[in-house]
Image (cartoon, helix red, strand yellow):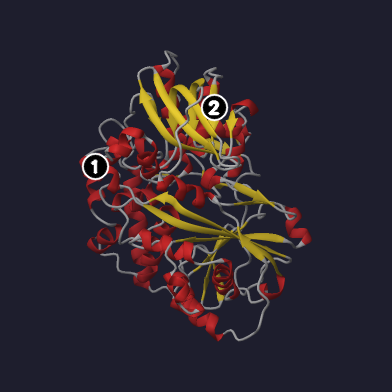
Amino acid sequence: MATVELSLTRRELIASVLGAAVAQSACKDTQPRSPVPGAIVDRAVHAGHALREGSLPLHTGPFRSVDVAIVGAGVAGLSAAWRLAAAGVQDVVVCELEAHEGGTARGGRNHVGAFPWGAHYLPTPLHDTGPVMRLLHELGAVEGVDARGRPHFAEHVLISEPEERLFFKGAWYEGLYLRAGASAEDLAQLARFESRMAAFAAARDARGRKAFAVPVAHSSDDGEWTALDLLTMAQWMAQAGFTSRRLQWLVDYACRDDFGTTPESTSAWAGVWYFAARQEGAGGRAEGYLSWPEGNARLVAQLARSVTPRQWLRSTLVHTLEPMDGGCRVHAVDTATGAPVGLMARQVVFCGPRFVAARVLAPWRKAPPAWLSAFTYAPWVVANLTVSAPPQGRGFPLAWDNVLHESRSLGYVVAGHQEERQARNGTCVLTWYYPFADTDPRAGRTRMLSAGYEEWEALVMADLLRPHPELAHTAERLEVMRWGHAMVRPTPGLLWGEARRAAQASVGAVHFAHTDLGGIALFEEANHFGVRAAESALADLGRKVESWL
């Protein structure tokens, strides 16, 4: 593992990750403080390196026969298990590397309450259709559906006000667009940008499909719109004459937030999708966002109810899939004991990213697909900071989402924003997000993995002490989770190119499900492809079911 970044000074390391403005501010802060106790809590990176080295033994003993083996218990894998359970298929095994399910949508809990370790919200769907709405009905999040098929959601799951705010030059402002001090030209460009996005949202093709829809598979494939996939979002902005630095910051934030990239490396189709897919133009918008203290781990828990205790194989690293006539051999190892595990599955649903599939699927290991290089992945860090009192600040009051304008981080979410209990007793958990939106994600991973806990503690606190100097005294514990390949990057050409189409094809009895098949790393994409893969497995098992898609 490279350690070059550790030779940097603390100030240089902060500048390389968070930006020069944060490093300068941190340098000016001469007040001594005690380091916040805590730890780096992830461990999957070590198992992943074992898989990369390819030294794990094949299983030679008797193989356990199953109808379906699901590899990976993130949202895609659990969605597949959920769909299979609804179809009455019980002979299912779910193999998961970690001791807990959820992948990048997992959550945690401490003495204060629950908090997310990754995805922390779900935008409300526009219509009462599809598997996500089915899941939300199961969860009791839907209060009703109107005559036009538009769902209405329970108040307790809709993010309560204040929803979001922005920190800029010592004060907090409402919303994510900095209106304070905006020029007439800034506001005119914002209005023109919003008008363009509304027009994209209202666009339909001859078959009635939205030009930009959720999930991506429901979008129109007409060249009129997919041609945007050949440009970067930065190029499209320049061509459209959007030169306002405030608007450019908003678009940059959107790309870093949803895609782990910058506009210079984000497909313009994806950039437009961010602003257009969740509205219909002419004022037709979703109700807002759904969230829980543990974030999307609440949705994970609902999906996981479909998996019985006997179906789980936790702490299990699947390292080889051998498709053959009549099914697929699954070779794995118990990471706790080192014991080999073998399954003979009639069908397999593989729910990992493409680069892992290329290391696990035996035919691809021998001859990697030519399209594999089209898929790249952004590293992320998520840190949960427990504090003994709510953060203070000048200007707009504490919100659910608190964004720092002059930082390369995404700021923090107050995990217990929806729970009055935390507001009363003062303690809360701040969930801090940082995407390595470098053009070269490998360099980002090197920096991320090279920094130890002391460096990450300094980085997180340097970022948060600028708006909240009192955290030097109220911070109780910091825990850091590193995600080496957190999300697929929708770089130009991926969303509507041949690589993504080719990657979706089954290989014998092996069907694939992951957000990278959609090109955008969101819950709806994982759920869509999990259900899709399960329905492919059902068809091959001879089970006739009505599609949920």
| SS type, badge 1 | helix
Quadrant for the C terminus, please: top left
Q: Amino acid at mark 2?
A: Val
Q: Kindly check if marks 2 and 1 are in contact, taking CB atoms under 8 A apart as contact.
A: no
Q: Amino acid at mark 1?
A: Ala
Relative depth, front residue between 403 and 370: 370
Q: Residue at x 42, y 71 (%)?
A: 4
Residue 294 visible in the displayed image: no
Relative depth, front residue between 170 and 435: 435
Q: Residue at x 53, y 35 (%)?
A: 151
Quadrant for the N terminus, please: bottom left
In the picture, the disc for residue 370 is 1
| SS type, badge 2 | strand
Vertical placement of 370 versus 93: above or below?
A: below
Image position, residue 308 (x, y; %): 63, 26
| 195 lies left or right of 304 | left
Q: Residue at x 50, y 37 (%)?
A: 72
| 49 lies left or right of 243 | right
Image position, residue 447 (x, y; %): 44, 66
Residue ID for mark 2:
93
Q: Crowdedness of circle 2 by 10 Å Cα count: few (<14), some, many (20+)?
A: many
Determine the CA span between mark 2 and mark 1: 31 Å
Relative depth, front residue between 468 and 22: 22
User: Which quadrant of the structure image shows residue 280?
Assistant: top left
Image position, residue 323 (x, y; %): 36, 26
Vertical placement of 264 versus 348: above or below?
A: below
Residue 254 visible in the displayed image: yes
Vertical placement of 468 versus 97: above or below?
A: below
